[in-house]
Image (tube, coloured by chain):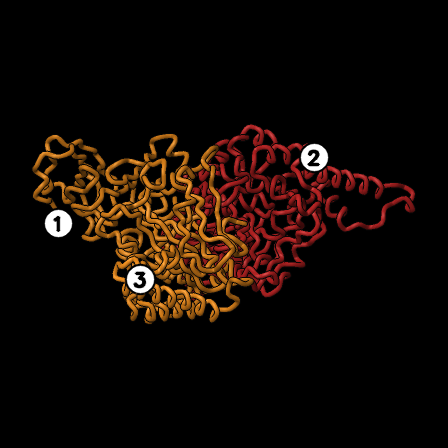
Chain colours: A red, B orange
């Protein structure tokens, strides 16, 4: 009996193993695989099954089934994540008809959905993908008090529905000079304080809306209001408020408002964040830092530092890198290059890589799907012929959901 | 390889000897363990350690493990908040950018931090002819005259900024089309030719001399090849228009940006016209940059076109100028030509190659000390020297602030692009 049972179990195992091997469709073979879920693997293999990662390990321990597609590279990383961009909204031609990142006519428009403006065919999406970016957090740009919603998408797909990972990721707000109308516009907000007052008033309105929705008397419940519905999601903690701020004054204002309304805050840009490390840490707020190579110029970003990502990270603040918004030439930055310069300015290699992979995924709340090379996660990879951060290396392959979407060396 | 003028044994100013670095002289192959000897602001000798004697009284600076290369030459920059012409006319040759540059602008210190030592500071591209450019050395100075490069007669050197394509088109008196742009420019140069004829005919006779005109005098300098045209141009047909104007009027010209230069590389090579290019992180941002590619440097190199890089600061940050050469290599340029494009090629385009752009005995001691390979993202500019004087030292906290940024790093930076929309500074 025992012998028979053992044989049966062995048969079941064999059948199971056979089935698993048959479904493996792709093997990624790397001299170095940075999994971002532990130490890098030397001479590693990743097996992909139905668009998901099924096995990760050393080549000696993970046999590659015969006859399946095999992609080989010197360096393999998780598909990169750009934690904040506007590609798909701000077109590369920079003409009025391809600029959908900002409706500047009203100060507060949280009801603007990102999925209604995303153009998955925009050329800059393919451009950043060519350098290894597979996931983007994109949508309404900084530049008005509340410009609208953001979404998370893969850099592939024929339609927004094909591309989308999270259709409503965050609500994008801006404080400081960039949120002001000019005096000549004679529209509020015209000052920093007015902007904060308007933001608080709108959140109070949303609180009242939420309260009245719970009234027993149906007649006293408010009519549907898309604007307030969106802000209710923020109040309930279902959508973070991403506030683009640069000056220390404005960073503190954002934290003050977030604490008043008990909302999930994500700081964005944050040129002067290095002045407020204790305050940001105490608030438990993550930071999507400005591009490392951003123009300092004159104005709110004049004090930015290439070392901010490193300073925040060393203090234990979660940091992700972004390509940001560019109004002119170049029309977009590339998150890989921005992380590279952060790696040259205080971050270790793996720390810098984390700002465009796992830490970005955590801040965006999609680390169950992307950001590291682990079984069960989406089979998104970037392949390089050398150190991905070296200017003279090339991205030689990009895989999204187990499908190779780019093979041109870039 | 060792270059030692006979005069080096004679008593002169005390020498500084930089010993042990990998030296990339540019005009000859790299020297693995080299010596660079500097005295009186000039390079006295460059060569391998074993065959380059260090004078006994020289101050020895140990730079073993470091890399030394020439100071970088930026053929197209806007640091210093300079202005060019105003909105009153599309052609303003009398306007000099040197009359508006703020030498205290932090952009200069950031450029020093990036290893730049020579700059061509230009007016913007909002005019067909936006004014006179100025060639600067990034000396520490309090006046523009202290930074400016002078010729033997004491004249401040510079070129002439011109532009075609969309930036210089708008409401009258500016042109509305490309053909109108070319016509306006041709008319002005024809006028300058006439002026020049009158000057020649007068042969110094005050009775016959035409009235002085600052505009005409500047254009005559261009016609006589004493002032090089630095021509902003992107689209392939605009590039060809510049070549056509050059043939008609015979001026010396450097093509700048040249986003679609890869489409007409052979034609540019046939005219033997050099190109000063910029590589940015993506195409687009304006219609004329929609076909901008990172491989332009490689394409021009293979066509035999002399190619330099420029920052167009603030379009790209002067502190990251080395990065551009590395991106050029990434997209097909040879390492040698990419490093030349940061140094000697640019110096040639400014006709300053007798003074700077390579490490050779007799040239100005403009050089940088790097922590590693110039094309590596991890390499840092440690020190920058202009004419033998250290103008940037990463170990000095004030200089370091300029190199990496931080509180107080930015002040007085303002971009003045007259006239055209969507200016460069995120405006």
Distance CA(mark 1)–CA(mark 3) = 56 Å
- A230 vs A253: above or below: below
Q: Position of residue A215 (x, y in %)?
A: 87, 41
Residue pictured at 50% horizontal, 47% vertical:
A357
Q: Residues within 10 Å of mark 2 (few under 14, many from 20)?
A: some
Residue pictured at 47% horizontal, 64% vertical:
B165
The chain ID associated with circle 1 is B
Q: Position of residue B302 (x, y in %)?
A: 29, 66
Q: Position of residue A311 (x, y in %)?
A: 47, 34
Distance CA(mark 3)–CA(mark 2) = 84 Å
The part of the image, by quadrant, that contains residue B190 is bottom left
Residue pictured at 27% horizontal, 59% vertical:
B205
- Residue under label 2, please give it: A262
- Residue under label 3, please give it: B208
Q: Secondary structure at mark 3?
A: loop
Q: Secondary structure at mark 2?
A: loop
Q: Which mark is residue B1?
A: 1
Is residue B356 visible in the rendered image? The answer is: yes
B343 on left or right of A381: left
Q: Nearer the viewer, residue A209 or A306?
A: A306
Residue pictured at 51% horizontal, 62% vertical:
B174
A330 on left or right of B300: right
Q: Nearer the viewer, residue A287 or B140?
A: B140
- Do marks 1 and 3 share a subunit? yes
Distance CA(mark 1)–CA(mark 2) = 71 Å
Q: Which mark is residue B308?
A: none
The chain ID associated with circle 3 is B
Q: Residues within 10 Å of mark 3 (few under 14, many from 20)?
A: few
- B385 vs B177: above or below: above
């Amino acid at each position: 009996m025992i012998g028979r049972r053992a044989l049966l179990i062995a048969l079941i195992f064999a059948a199971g193993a056979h089935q698993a091997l048959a479904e493996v469709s792709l093997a990624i073979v790397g001299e170095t695989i940075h999994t971002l879920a532990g130490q890098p693997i030397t001479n590693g293999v990743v097996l992909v099954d139905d668009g998901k990662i099924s096995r990760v390990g050393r080549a000696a321990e993970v046999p590659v089934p015969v006859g399946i597609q095999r992609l080989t590279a010197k360096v393999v990383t998780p598909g990169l994540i750009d934690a904040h961009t506007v590609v798909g909204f701000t077109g590369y031609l920079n003409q009025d008809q391809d600029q959908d990142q900002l409706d500047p006519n009203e100060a507060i428009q949280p009801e603007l959905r990102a999925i209604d403006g995303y153009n998955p065919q925009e050329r800059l999406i393919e451009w950043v993908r060519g350098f290894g970016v597979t996931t983007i957090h994109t949508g309404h740009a900084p530049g008005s008090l509340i410009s609208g919603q953001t979404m998370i998408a893969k850099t592939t797909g024929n339609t927004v529905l094909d591309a989308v990972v999270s259709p409503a990721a965050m609500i994008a707000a801006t404080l400081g000079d960039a949120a002001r109308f000019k005096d000549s516009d004679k529209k509020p907000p015209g000052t920093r304080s007015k902007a904060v007052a308007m933001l608080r008033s709108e959140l109070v309105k949303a609180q009242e809306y939420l309260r009245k929705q719970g009234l027993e008397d149906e007649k006293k419940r408010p009519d549907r209001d898309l604007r307030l519905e969106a802000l209710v999601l923020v109040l309930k903690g279902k959508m973070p408020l991403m506030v683009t701020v640069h000056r220390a004054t404005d960073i503190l204002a954002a934290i003050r408002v977030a604490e008043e309304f008990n909302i999930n805050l994500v700081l964005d840009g944050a040129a002067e964040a290095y002045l407020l490390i204790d305050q940001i840490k105490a608030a438990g707020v993550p930071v999507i830092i400005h591009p490392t190579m951003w123009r300092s110029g004159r104005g709110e970003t004049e004090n930015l530092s290439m070392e901010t990502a490193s300073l925040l990270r060393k203090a234990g603040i979660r940091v992700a890198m972004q390509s940001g918004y560019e109004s002119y030439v170049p029309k977009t930055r590339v998150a890989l290059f921005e992380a590279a310069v952060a790696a040259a300015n205080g971050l270790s290699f793996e720390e810098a890589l984390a700002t465009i992979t796992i830490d970005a995924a955590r801040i965006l709340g999609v680390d169950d799907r992307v950001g590291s090379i682990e079984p069960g996660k989406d089979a998104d990879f970037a392949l390089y012929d050398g150190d991905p951060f070296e200017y003279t290396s090339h991205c030689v392959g990009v895989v999204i959901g187990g499908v190779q979407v780019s093979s041109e060396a870039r | 390889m060792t270059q030692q003028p006979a005069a080096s044994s004679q008593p002169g100013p005390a020498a500084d000897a930089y010993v042990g670095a990998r030296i990339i002289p540019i005009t000859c192959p790299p020297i693995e363990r080299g010596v660079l000897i500097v005295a009186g602001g000039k390079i006295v000798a460059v060569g391998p350690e074993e065959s380059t004697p260090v004078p006994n009284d020289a101050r020895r600076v140990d730079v073993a493990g470091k890399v030394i290369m020439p100071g970088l030459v930026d053929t197209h920059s806007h640091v210093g908040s300079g202005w060019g012409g105003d909105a009153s006319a599309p052609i303003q040759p009398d306007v000099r950018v040197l009359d508006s540059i703020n030498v205290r602008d932090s952009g200069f210190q950031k450029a020093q931090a990036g290893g730049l030592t020579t700059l061509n500071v230009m007016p913007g591209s909002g005019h067909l002819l936006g004014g006179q450019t100025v060639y600067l050395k990034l000396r520490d100075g309090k006046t523009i005259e202290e930074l400016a490069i002078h010729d033997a007669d004491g004249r401040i050197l510079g070129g002439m900024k011109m532009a075609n394509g969309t930036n210089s088109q708008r409401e009258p008196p500016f042109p509305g089309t490309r053909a109108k742009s070319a016509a306006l420019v041709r008319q002005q140069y024809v006028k300058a030719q006439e002026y020049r004829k009158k000057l020649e005919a007068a042969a110094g006779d005050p009775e016959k001399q035409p009235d002085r005109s600052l505009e005409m005098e500047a254009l005559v300098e261009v016609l006589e090849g004493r002032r090089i045209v630095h021509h902003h141009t992107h689209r392939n047909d605009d590039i060809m228009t510049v070549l056509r104007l050059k043939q008609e009027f015979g001026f010396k010209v450097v093509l700048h940006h040249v986003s679609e230069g890869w489409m007409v590389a052979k034609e540019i090579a046939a005219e033997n016209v050099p190109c000063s290019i910029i590589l940015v992180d993506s195409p687009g941002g304006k219609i004329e940059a929609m076909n901008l590619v990172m491989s332009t440097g490689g394409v021009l190199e293979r066509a035999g076109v002399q190619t330099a890089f420029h920052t167009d600061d603030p379009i790209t940050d002067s502190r990251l100028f080395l990065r551009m050469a590395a991106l050029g290599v990434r997209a097909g340029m040879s390492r040698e030509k990419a490093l030349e494009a940061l140094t000697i090629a640019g110096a040639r385009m400014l006709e300053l190659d007798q003074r700077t752009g390579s490490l050779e005995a007799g040239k100005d001691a403009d050089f940088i000390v790097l922590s590693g390979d110039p094309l590596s993202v991890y390499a840092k500019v440690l020190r920058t020297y202009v004419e033998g004087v250290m103008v940037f030292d990463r170990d000095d906290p004030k200089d370091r602030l300029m190199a990496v940024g931080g509180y107080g790093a930015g002040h007085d930076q303002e971009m003045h692009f007259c006239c055209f929309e969507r200016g460069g500074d995120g405006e």
